[in-house]
Image: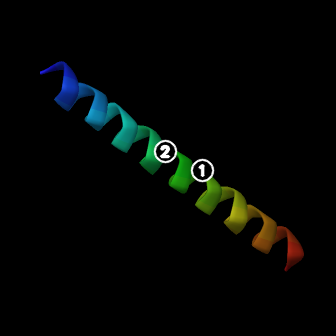
Amino acid sequence: MIMKKSILTVLFALICTMGFSQVSFNVKAGLNL
């Protein structure tokens, strides 16, 4: 149970990090335009 929860937490953090970098990349691209 705890193991599964920690895996989900890591997965969630990974998705958040990827989403954040994607958003910041889009913002930089938008500013360059």
Observer-nearest of 19 and 32: 19
Residue 20: mark: 1
Where does the image place residue 22, in percent across and percent down from the top left? 60, 62
Q: Mark 2 belongs to which amino acid?
A: Cys
Is 28 situated above or below 11? below
Is 3 situated above or below 10? above
In the picture as drawn, the residue positioned furthest to the front comes out as 3
Residue at the location (74% across, 62% down)?
27
- Relative side of 3 to 10, left or right: left
Secondary element at image label 2:
helix
Quadrant into which the C terminus falls: bottom right
In the picture as drawn, the residue positioned furthest to the right comes out as 32
* Numbered circles on residues, count: 2
Residue at the location (63% across, 56% down)?
21
Q: Which residue is mark 2?
A: 16
Observer-nearest of 15 and 27: 15
Other-residue count near label 2 (Cα within 10 Å), few / some / many at <14 / 14–19 / ≥20: few
Where does the image place residue 31, in percent across and percent down from the top left? 85, 68
Secondary element at image label 1:
helix
Is 16 situated above or below 7? below
Q: CA distance from mark 2 to mark 1?
A: 6 Å
Q: Are marks 2 and 1 in contact (CB under 8 Å)?
A: yes
Q: Residue 32: name its quadrant.
A: bottom right
